[in-house]
Image: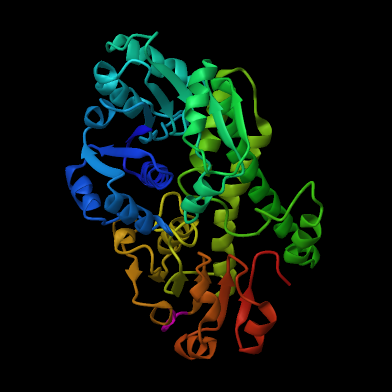
């Protein structure tokens, strides 16, 4: 099929590259001419495992092209995917101005029979919104169908998630159009759920809100474990063997972050409030998460004797999780800012973040490696679970430090091993 993907961001690039890999003719459009020029050369602007290889494959086969402007890609497409950003408003609502702008741009060039698909995470009712905008801008409603096909891509594993999804969800009032969208995924082994658009849109929000709830729940359990001298890791293992619960997202840490959970949880709270329902449970999830960020500061403060003024802290990790360069709503960025606010000097290392943290955290010192970040530190805080931190030479780390405190906010390290090496170790809910 001829496919247009509008937006060359994280979701758009993965969607375009994977559809090209499945054999479709894909044009991926963006408004940033420089970004398009670099992508044409195979230069991928985001860190995502396997994506550069897929883009190179698509360019070589000529099944994948990058163009400037949504209308350029949409005018020959049978199916158009909207993968533009939907930033969070001050009240938690999703800003649909980018979606609206693209819909108005492509309306007059769409071929009869085109299916326009919302791939971005959008509020319930957005398919009707896009249909209305398209009609206002010149597309005949009888010629163009709008569907929802929410993405469930984890950063760092997006390619794998696209190629091996748990499910494919398609929301569309017109079943023939839904079937056409489903045919794009031939070769992908996963159940396909065809439903109404509102239910498809709600599935995405409900899924992410539930996962955020699991994160906050296990963090709250970890905090109780610290108070009663239990080990949260053992508790999580014991819970996870229950097939009704499962092991995923039962990993105590500094709280959730990233581009999806905070935004989608806030959006669902806004949707529920607008619908007249007080979603107290989900509001509590947000409160627990905020408190968990701050609890990490308490741990560092306790590790250095009560005051952070004049203390040097080595920070391992700045991205919101490993295997990505995404700093959006990262707990590590929150922790870095709070440490600096309380008078600490913060020396940080993250091999995936590049120089971007400098603009986000004024006063932050970026280091060349984990050992450099630990040099002269009174305490080291491990905030992002990059695997390299597991295999460091900890004798070298200990000798480089001024103090002996390690706060392991991801429970990546073995407490007993760290203590044998002379560290004053703190995890999250660990004994």
Q: Is residue 332 visible?
A: yes
Q: Is residue 305 visible?
A: no
Q: Main secondary structure of the magenta part?
A: loop
Which sits in the foreground, 104 or 211? 104
Horizontally, residue 393 falls left or right of residue 228, namely left
Question: Based on the displayed image, in which of its 4 quarters is residue 406 positioned?
Answer: bottom right
The correct choice, above or below, for 249 with respect to 269 in the image is below
Judge whether 38 appears above or below 186 on screen: below
Quarter of the figure with residue 284: top right
Question: Which stretch appears magenta?
Answer: 373-377
Question: Where does the image place residue 120, in percent across and percent down from the top left?
Answer: 43, 34
Residue 408 screen position, x and y as percent:
58, 70
Locate residue 398, reporting x and y percent: 52, 87
Image-based side of 246 in relation to 411, left or right = right
Numbered disc total: 0
Q: What residue is drawn where x is 61% and y is 88%? A: 422
What colour scheme has been applied to the protein in the rendered image?
A: rainbow
- Using residue 21 as the reference point, say whether residue 151 is left or right of it: right
Does the magenta-highlighted stretch encompass residue 35? no
Residue 271: where, in percent of width, then height?
55, 24
Residue at the image point whose x is 27% and y is 10% from the top: 138
Q: Which of the image's four quarters has the C terminus?
A: bottom right
Where, quadrant-wise, is the N terminus in this rendering? top left
Tell me the residue at 42%/82% (across/down): 371
Left or right of 62, for residue 338: right
Quadrant position of residue 80:
top left
């Amino acid at each position: 099929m001829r496919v247009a993907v509008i937006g060359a961001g994280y979701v758009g690039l993965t969607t375009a590259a994977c559809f090209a890999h499945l054999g479709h003719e894909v044009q991926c459009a963006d408004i940033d001419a420089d970004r398009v020029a670099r992508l044409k050369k195979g230069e991928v602007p985001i860190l995502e495992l396997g994506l550069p290889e897929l883009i190179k494959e698509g360019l070589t086969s000529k099944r994948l092209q990058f163009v400037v402007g949504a209308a350029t890609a949409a005018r020959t497409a049978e199916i158009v995917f909207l993968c533009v950003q939907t930033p969070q408003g001050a009240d938690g609502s999703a800003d649909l101005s980018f979606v609206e702008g693209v819909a108005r741009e492509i309306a007059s060039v769409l071929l009869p029979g085109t299916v326009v698909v919302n791939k971005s995470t959008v509020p319930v009712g957005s398919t009707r919104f896009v249909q209305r905008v398209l009609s206002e801008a010149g597309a005949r409603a009888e010629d163009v169908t709008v569907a929802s096909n929410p993405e469930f891509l984890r950063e760092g594993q997006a390619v794998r998630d696209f190629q091996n999804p748990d499910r494919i969800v398609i929301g569309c009032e017109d079943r023939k159009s839904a079937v056409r969208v489903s045919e794009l995924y031939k070769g992908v082994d996963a159940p396909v759920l065809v439903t109404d658009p509102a239910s498809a849109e709600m599935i995405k929000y409900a899924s992410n809100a539930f996962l955020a709830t699991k994160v906050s729940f296990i963090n709250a359990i970890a905090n109780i474990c610290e108070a009663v001298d239990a080990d949260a890791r053992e508790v999580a293992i014991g819970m996870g063997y229950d097939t009704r619960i499962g092991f995923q997202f039962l990993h105590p840490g500094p709280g959730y972050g990233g581009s999806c959970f905070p935004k989608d949880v806030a959006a669902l709270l806004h949707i529920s409030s607008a619908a007249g329902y007080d979603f107290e449970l989900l509001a509590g999830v947000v409160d627990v998460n905020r408190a968990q960020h701050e609890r990490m500061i308490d741990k560092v403060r306790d590790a250095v004797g009560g005051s952070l003024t004049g203390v040097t802290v080595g920070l391992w990790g700045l991205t919101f999780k490993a295997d990505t360069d995404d700093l959006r709503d990262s707990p590590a960025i929150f922790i870095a800012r709070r440490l600096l606010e309380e008078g600490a000097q913060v020396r940080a290392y993250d091999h995936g973040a590049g120089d971007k943290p400098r603009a986000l955290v004024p006063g932050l010192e970026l280091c060349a490696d984990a050992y450099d970040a630990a040099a002269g530190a009174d305490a080291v805080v491990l905030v992002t679970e990059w695997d390299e931190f597991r295999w460091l030479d900890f004798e070298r780390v200990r000798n480089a430090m001024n103090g002996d405190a390690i706060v392991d906010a991801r429970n990546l390290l073995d407490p007993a091993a760290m203590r044998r090496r002379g560290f004053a170790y703190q995890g999250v809910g660990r004994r």
